[in-house]
Image: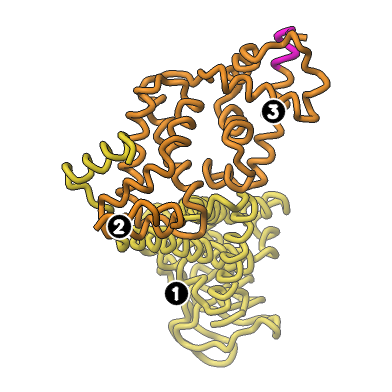
Chain colours: A orange, B yellow
């Protein structure tokens, strides 16, 4: 029996999982809670068109539903569903043998703001360095560095959440982020953008 | 509900998709945990056999075999078992990482903990007496096993070089007994001099290592007698 819409926003993820396992229709509420941010994440991670991203999202949610009983409270549901989304998106790109790229100009500007506010970059980035230039440089990073940059700057995830999403220890995440920033800075310098 | 959520829930209902049951994941998780524990146990077996081989190796016989000390040390390293240990530690690491939150731990920590567990358990197996049994079991059941390890049978049946080993088949008068070596040849042995601290009480079916001198086709004077296993740790 579907739940009243008014009660849904009060429920946490675990409660939504519980009611989804009891009644398939209720799974729609869980989808609704995550669909917008996961769709945006898929596009950010892969650069695919919205229609393709929706296909990936659909596959992701079906996979999540099949594996709902696997989830346990040792990690946040958000990290768990992001992990599955991440893996599905990467698998999709591998099937297409495509390289990911940052598609949205809005994201490029957002990235530019974050990078400029980062003490490691701020002073070095000049105004003539455009957001689209930065997006190109980020697209050229190694995938492992690009992934953590997106999760940290665009998805606003903590080290712990990134660790749970990409299944690496927190220490490794910190190293990846540090190396990602260094590679980003090196590439910006190398491309003579200053 | 949004269009996407409606479409997905409709697909789930139309295709009669069901969540995999909880027992499926419990089985998978316990399976991974079991493989991790098995890897640790196999690693422990490797540790106990390494200990056995190190303790059982007779460092004082190099001079009888015209070997340098360096060659002796190189020969005594149980490479096969060290490789086996590394393989099982890697398997333990792999299985741990596959567990639900195993990825949260650094490689070296998982490796060190697996190694420590294998060593603790391996020392237990060693003192429990399973060490030599593993070696013997593999020697008897796995045809190529002895090609990969230091084979002390070959070394200790070298009467021309003063080394002899085998099983006591008859205890005769004082200081004399009959020994069948591991190649099946029967020897009349006379004890000339023995190291009291290492000296086992001679009885039938006891397996021994002798250092001494060949005095005839089937006679041997033993200057040093020691038990076949573990330098006297147990008979």
| Label 1 and label 2 in one chain | no
Q: Earlier in the sequence, mark 3 or mark 2?
A: 2
Which is more toward the observer, B69 or A108?
A108
Residue A53, quarter of picture: top left
Which segment did they paint magenta? Answer: A187-193
Residue B128 visible: yes
Q: Which residue is mark 1?
A: B180
Q: How many marks?
A: 3
Tell me if residue B80 can be seen: no
Q: Which residue is mark 3?
A: A114
Check the residue under mark 1 and report the chain it is in.
B
**Which residue is pictured at 47% across the width and 19% down the height?**
A99
Q: Are marks 3 and 1 on the same chain?
A: no
Please report the residue visible at 43 percent of the width from the left and 32 percent of the height from the top: A39
Q: Secondary structure at mark 3?
A: helix
Q: Secondary structure at mark 2?
A: helix
Marks 3 and 2: same chain?
Answer: yes
Snapshot quadrant of residue B195: bottom right
Taking A15 as reference, is B173 above or below it? below
Location of residue B178 with respect to B152 vertically, above or below? below
Residue found farthest to the front:
A6
The chain letter under disc 2 is A
Q: Are marks 3 and 1 in contact (CB under 8 Å)?
A: no
* Residue located farthest toward the bottom when viewing the structure as drawn: B173
Q: Position of residue B1 (x, y in %)?
A: 32, 41
Q: Mark 2 = which residue?
A: A21
């Amino acid at each position: 029996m579907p739940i009243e819409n008014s009660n849904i926003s009060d429920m946490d993820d675990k409660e939504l999982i519980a009611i989804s396992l009891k009644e398939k229709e209720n799974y729609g509420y869980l989808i609704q809670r995550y669909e917008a941010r996961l769709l945006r994440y898929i596009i950010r991670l892969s650069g695919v068109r919205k229609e393709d991203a929706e296909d990936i999202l659909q596959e992701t949610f079906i996979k999540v539903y099949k594996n709902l009983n696997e989830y346990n409270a040792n990690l946040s549901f958000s990290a768990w569903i992001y992990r599955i989304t991440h893996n599905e998106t990467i698998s999709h790109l591998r099937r297409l043998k495509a390289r990911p790229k940052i598609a949205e100009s809005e994201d490029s500007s957002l990235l530019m703001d974050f990078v400029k506010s980062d003490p490691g970059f701020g002073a070095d980035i000049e105004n003539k360095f455009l957001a689209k230039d930065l997006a190109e440089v980020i697209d050229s990073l190694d995938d492992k560095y690009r992934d953590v940059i997106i999760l940290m700057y665009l998805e606003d995830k903590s080290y712990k959440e990134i660790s749970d999403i990409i299944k690496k220890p927190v220490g490794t995440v910190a190293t990846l982020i540090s190396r990602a920033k260094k590679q980003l800075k090196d590439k910006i310098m190398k491309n003579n953008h200053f | 509900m949004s269009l996407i959520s409606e479409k997905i829930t409709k697909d789930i209902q139309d295709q009669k998709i069901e969540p995999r049951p909880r027992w499926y994941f419990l089985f998978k998780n316990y399976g991974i945990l079991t493989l991790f524990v098995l890897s640790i146990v196999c690693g422990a077996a490797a540790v106990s056999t390494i200990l056995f081989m190190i303790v059982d190796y007779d460092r004082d016989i190099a001079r009888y075999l015209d070997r340098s000390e360096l060659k002796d040390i190189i020969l005594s390293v149980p490479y096969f078992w060290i490789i086996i240990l590394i393989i099982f530690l890697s398997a333990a690491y792999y299985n741990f990482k596959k567990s639900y939150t195993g990825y949260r731990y650094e490689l070296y920590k998982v490796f060190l903990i697996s190694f420590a567990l294998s060593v603790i358990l391996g020392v237990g197996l060693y003192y429990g007496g399973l060490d030599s049994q593993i070696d013997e079991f593999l020697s008897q059941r796995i045809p190529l096993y002895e090609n990969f390890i230091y084979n002390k049978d070959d070394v200790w049946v070298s009467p021309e070089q003063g080394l002899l080993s085998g099983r006591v088949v008859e205890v005769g008068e004082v200081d004399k007994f009959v020994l069948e070596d591991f190649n099946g040849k029967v020897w009349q042995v006379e004890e000339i001099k023995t190291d009291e601290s290492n000296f086992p009480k001679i009885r039938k079916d006891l397996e021994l290592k002798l250092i001494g001198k060949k005095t005839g086709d089937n006679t041997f004077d033993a200057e040093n007698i020691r038990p076949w296993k573990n330098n006297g740790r147990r008979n």
